[in-house]
Amino acid sequence: MRQPQESTAAGSRRSTGGNVAAGALALIREVALVLAIALGLSLLIKTFLVQAFYIPSASMQNTLEAGDRVLVSKLSPGPLSLHRGDIVVFADPGGWLTPSFEEPESPVRSAIRSTLTFVGLLPSDSGEHLIKRVIGLPGDKVACCDAAGRLTVNGVAINEPYLFPGNRPSDIDFSVTVPPGRIWVMGDHRSVSEDSRFHRDVHDGTVPIDDVVGKAFVVVWPPGRMEILHNPEAAFAHVTPQ
């Protein structure tokens, strides 16, 4: 017996609707899977390889400007060693940063920002970290200034091409031997950088290598300032360990 035409049309509509729903569900599952993989990879990269950071001040001019975003390799220190001249991000060793006031934000906005920062999709803020240049490694004797007004490392005078124009290597005279497991750091804009020179009360101003997050290797924002951060190897080429 032939099926009524209305019944056939209704069945066809149900079949089409079911296919659309199944397709939409499959698409949602696929998008969710892709997002989960992307977030997992982002978290893995941030945890073990690379992290973004925001530059809060002018202490590293002209190499870095306030507002720049940099990527930091977490392979140094670690599988790769730190070198004199490297630009490093490190956690506040204690008392280097003054507490900053932040405008309150909604719980939803705060949760989203914290999540994106946690997985590495947003740069970490400057509230707990600093960025400076490594001048002295463990065992080095760093002093300033010699008769020509230059910084010396292990008695070798350093010509510093990265210094902010018009700055002296230091307006403060100092001489320090870097203890084991620590580094001596200074900003490129010496006249405004409160670096190791200004924190001599604890461990003679040196920073624990364990507090170093990693080495900055590229500026990624703003677009007009994108560049690779090269180590000025020639400046320290004649320095030998003590």
Image: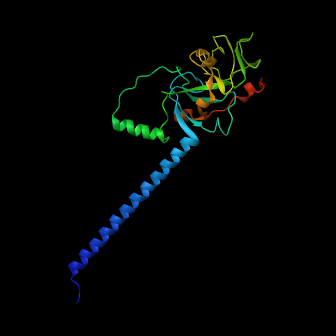
Which residue sits at x=23%, y=84%? Answer: 3
In which quadrant will I find the N terminus? bottom left
165 left or right, relative to 97: right
Residue 34 seen in the current view: yes
- The x, y position of residue 204, in whole percent, is 63, 17
Say which of 134 and 225 sits in front: 134
In the figure, 142 relative to 115: above or below? above
Depth check, front residue: 105 or 205: 205
Q: Quadrant of residue 89?
A: top right
Q: Is residue 232 left or right of residue 214?
A: right
Q: How far across and how far down the image is residue 32, in percent? A: 42, 54
Q: How many marks?
A: 0
Instruction: Please state the horizontal and vertical placement of residue 185, each as a whole percent of the image.
Output: 63, 23
Which colour scheme appears in the figure? rainbow
Horizontal arrangement in the rendering, residue 34 relative to residue 7 (left or right): right
Quarter of the image with the C terminus is: top right
